[in-house]
Image (tube, helix red, strand yellow):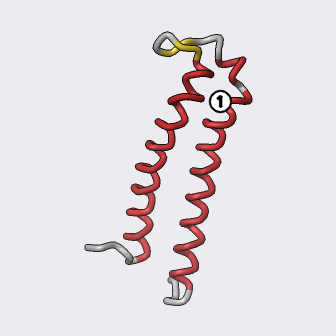
Amino acid sequence: MNTPEQTPKKYWKTNLKYLVILLIIWFAVSYGAGILFKDMLDQWYLGGFPLGFWFAQQGSIYVFVILIFVYVHLMDKLDKTHGYDEA
C-alpha cells in the first residue's frame, strides 16, 4: 500500500515515464521517418506523394495529435489510480 508521501512521487515518476516514451515515439516518427529514413521510405507512395515526404510534411503532425489523445487517456487512468480524478 502506498503511503500518502509515496503517492505524489510515484504519480510524477509515472507521468514522466509516459512523457519520455511518447516524446521518443514522436521524435522517431518526425526525425527518423521524415529525415533519416526518407530515402528508404520514398519507395512507397501515400496519396500520390513519396512516403518519406508525407511523413516530413503531414505524418509527424498526425502522429503528434494521436499522441496527445494517448497521453490524455493514460493520464486519466493514472489520475484515477492515484485518487486525483475529478469525479
Q: Residues within 10 Å of mark 1 (few under 14, many from 20)?
A: many
Is the residue 72 above or below the residue 66 in the image? below
Task: Tell me where residue 82 sits by quadrant.
Answer: bottom left
Above or below 62: residue 84? below
- For this view, does 80 lie left or right of residue 16? left
**Percent position of residue 83, x then y:** 38, 77
User: Farthest left residue?
Assistant: 87
The image position of residue 56, as x and y in percent, is 59, 29
Left or right: residue 75 versus residue 45 is left
User: Splitting the image into 4 quarters, where does residue 84 fall?
Assistant: bottom left
Residue that badge 1 annotates: 33
Asked which secondary structure carries label 1, the reply is helix
81 sits to left or right of 1: left
Give the residue displayed 29% in from the left and 73% down from the top.
Answer: 86
Q: Quadrant of the C terminus?
A: bottom left
Q: Position of residue 72 (x, y in %)?
A: 41, 57
Q: Which residue does the image show at 46% across and 14% down from the upper left?
A: 47
| Residue ID at (71%, 18%) | 40
Q: How many marks?
A: 1
Residue extending furthest toward the front: 57
Task: Give coordinates of residue 7: x percent, y percent.
Answer: 51, 81
